[in-house]
Amino acid sequence: MTGRPPYPVIYEVNTLPWLTALRERLGPATTLADLPARVWDELAPAGTNAVWLMGVWERSPAGLDLARGNPALQEAFRAALPDLRPEDVAGSPYCVRRYVVDPSLGGPAALAEARAQLARRGLRLILDYVPNHVAPDHPAVTAHPDWFVQGTPQDLAEDPAAWYAVGGHVLAHGRDPYFAPWPDVVQLNAYSRDVRRVTAEVLGDILDQCDGVRCDMAMLLTNDVFGKTWGPHAGAAPAEEFWPAVIGQVRRRHPGAMVIAEAYWDMEWTLQQQGFDFCYDKRLYDRLAHEDAEAVRTHLCAAPDYQERLLRFIENHDEPRAAAAMPGGRDRAAAVAIATLPGATLWHQGQLEGSRVQLPVFLARRPDEPFDAGLDRFYRRLLVAAAALRRDQWTLLGATGWPDNSTHRDLLAWAWHGELPHHLIVINLSGHAAQGRVALPWALGGRDWRLTDLVEGSAYRRDGDELAGAGLYVDLPPWGAHVLAVEAY
């Protein structure tokens, strides 16, 4: 396989529900090792170059028991899957008992076959790692209780939801500082030298089996966040941060691996500096989903070296389905944005087809949903177009309007340019029509130019002198967009 692309395009697959659906026609004992070539051929849409198989590790029986006994979770399960059956609840893939491929998927040998099948199709394999916590029945809980945040009997008595008694020790349940503790996991101590050493070893073992790793809730392990979350229970903060210590060791073993941080709270830059290749761009997601064009434009004014190491998305297993959360075509406008910006891009299985149900990660089966052929066609054209244009130099552009028409403020525009064809993206991030002129960054005067919309298929002939002077006039419908290749006639 050739070197890693500068802007990876990742397709997330919720592995167990995907395999459950395949078993309906291939047989109940089917594992990752048994899938025919056509399944791998059809898995990832053209324009992607990596597959994230989410949820391959051994799930915790103890965590499963807790999930089955939790009324709030059961209500959420039935809301997503009205015909819920007991066997549909498989436990959380983020309540990991061991970093060994779950037997229900076929074990390590089956994952190796899946990786080989993906590699034959030019696709890298991404897997998960959960650095903050482990399942209560993880072997380390009893073998190495000193690896975990320690409490006292008084802590347990005062806040039994936050603490866990095992083997004569009081250990903390995992948490982040803004939510109640997670009752199905036990909190590792990020300040512990042994935890850092073992984390690097486990990450190395994971990367023996794949090409990249997505680290869950990575910001929780920074010295500052960890100290604020756990206070004196954590002990004294070491001089070195958690991630530089860990990633530095991992790089020596796997220098070409891609390491991705799930990141929130505007900590993307911090985690980039601590060694991550790409960090979630949750701020862009929020602005595309809930704010206006000016908010997005301001976000995109950040430095290029920061932008290029963000992972853009409008859907993943933690967020609502884009077709449901961004109605009326807003999902299409947002999709054009994330597909054509610098940085990595994440798409989610079911997103292209218009799925609307956000499936709880505990479930092994997904509901039947209508297939949106028009949306699927749009996405597939967009991904192919984006694969061709994200090269050379990216430039954020402006749009101008007229005193009696301020809708140009709803337009977002940027360009990719180097050798011909140049590429221009213009998006109307509003629910009404928008008009304006976009100033182009190229010397276009003296000839005519063909502008071809790579998603819609339409083509336009424009005078180069007008383009070089007043700019390109655009008139876009609500949530409309152009993805244009600019070539000389």
Image (cartoon, rainbow, N blue to C red):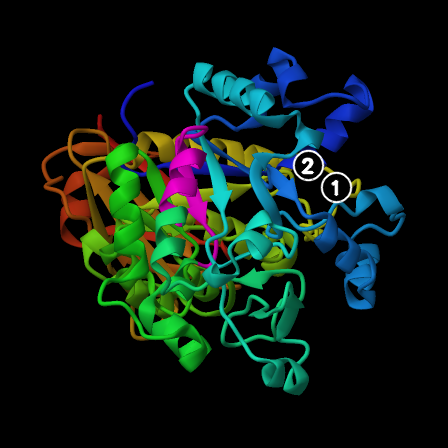
Q: Which residues are magenta?
A: 199-217
Which residue type carries mark 2? Leu
Kindly identify the residue that appears in the image at 10 percent across and 41 percent down.
443
Given contact means CB atoms under 8 Å apart, are the residues at marks 1 and 2 in contact? Answer: yes
Decide whether residue 206 is among the magenta residues: yes
Return the residue nearer the eye: 467 or 141: 141
Residue 225's quadrant in the figure? Answer: bottom left
Instruction: Classify 181 as above or below 478.
Output: below
With 339 as the anchor, is 161 left or right in this view? right
Distance from disc 1 to disc 2, alpha carbons, whole Å, reads 5 Å
With 480 as the anchor, is 410 left or right in this view? left
Per the image, the residue denoted by label 2 is 16
With 478 as the anchor, is 251 left or right in this view? left
Looking at the rendering, in which quadrant would you find the C terminus? top left
Kindly identify the residue that appears in the image at 20 percent across and 53 percent down.
304
Kindly identify the residue that appears in the image at 62 percent across and 74 percent down.
163
Q: Earlier in the sequence, mark 1 or mark 2?
A: 2
Residue 145 in the image: x percent, y percent?
53, 60
Residue 207's quadrant in the figure? Answer: top left
Looking at the rendering, in which quadrant would you find the N terminus? top left
Q: Secondary structure at mark 1?
A: loop
Per the image, the residue denoted by label 1 is 364
Return the residue nearer the eye: 328 or 70: 70
Residue 8 in the image: x percent, y percent?
36, 36
Residue 339 in the image: x percent, y percent?
40, 43
Residue 27's quadrant in the figure? Answer: top right
Q: Is residue 35 visible?
A: no
